[in-house]
Amino acid sequence: MSILHSRLLLILSIFGSLGSLWGLSAPIQACPAIILAYQVNGFERTHVTRDQLALYRFQGGLHSEWQEVPLELDPLDSEGSLLFPVGDAWRQLAVSATDRLSYAHSSGGNLYDGSIPAPCAASQLIELKSEEGLHYLAVCNDGHRSSIDSPVTFDEK
């Protein structure tokens, strides 16, 4: 495990234990799921641009549907430091092995049962499991661009 990963796990465990220190019975839900692109099992990054990625949850039942979930994609350098892109051109660049994907654990859905087509004409639909449910990382091929604003922005001012 790299130093970056061990430090990140330490920070997340500290935030997770704060709830018990403050007398909260439920765990803090603010901690996101964080994974680097190279850690996503089955994800073929070759020829995939950052703006093709979207995250979904499947809501099964009588009226099954895909619901888009906010996905934060942060480019990192080889040392794990955040690169602050200027403008939108970075979104058209290929997904890097060190790109950090983060999303809310609590936004998970159901197991995809194949009852409806994959979202956004996805060429890849990768299942991401957590205790809170399932998410699906999609490589969109229909020109889809996320309708959800990035949760984190950078202002040079």
Image: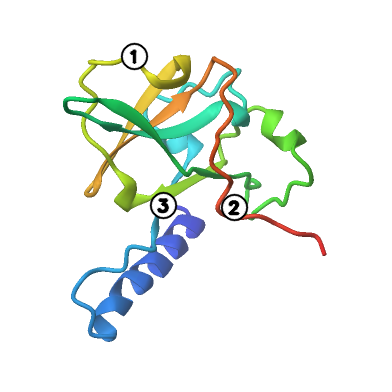
Q: CA distance from mark 3 to mark 1?
A: 38 Å
Seen from the viewer's position, the closer of residues 118 and 15 is 118
Residue topped by disc 1:
117
> Number of labelled discs?
3
Q: Which mark is residue 80?
A: 2
Q: Can you tell which quarter of the image residue 89 is in?
A: top right
Helix, strand or loop for disc 2: loop
Q: Which mark is residue 1?
A: 3
Percent across and percent down for residue 30 are 39, 63
Helix, strand or loop for disc 1: loop
From the image, state whether disc 3 or disc 2 is nearer to you: 2
Looking at the rendered structure, the kind of residue marked 2 is: Gly
Sequence order check, earlier mark of 3 and 1: 3
Q: Could you tell whether 77 is left or right of 45 in the image?
A: right
Q: CA distance from mark 1 to mark 2?
A: 36 Å
Looking at the rendered structure, the kind of residue marked 1 is: Pro
Sequence order check, earlier mark of 1 and 2: 2
Sequence order check, earlier mark of 3 and 2: 3
Q: Is residue 13 above or below residue 70?
A: below
Percent across and percent down for residue 62 are 17, 25
Percent across and percent down for residue 46 are 57, 19
The residue under the point 72% across, 36% down is 90
Mark 2 Cα shell of 10 Å, populated few (<14), some (14-19), many (≥20): some
The residue under the point 33% across, 47% down is 107
Mark 3 Cα shell of 10 Å, populated few (<14), some (14-19), many (≥20): few
Display colour scheme? rainbow
Q: Could you tell whether 155 is left or right of 120 in the image?
A: right
Q: Could you tell whether 57 is left or right of 11 in the image?
A: left
Q: Is residue 31 above or below residue 63?
A: below
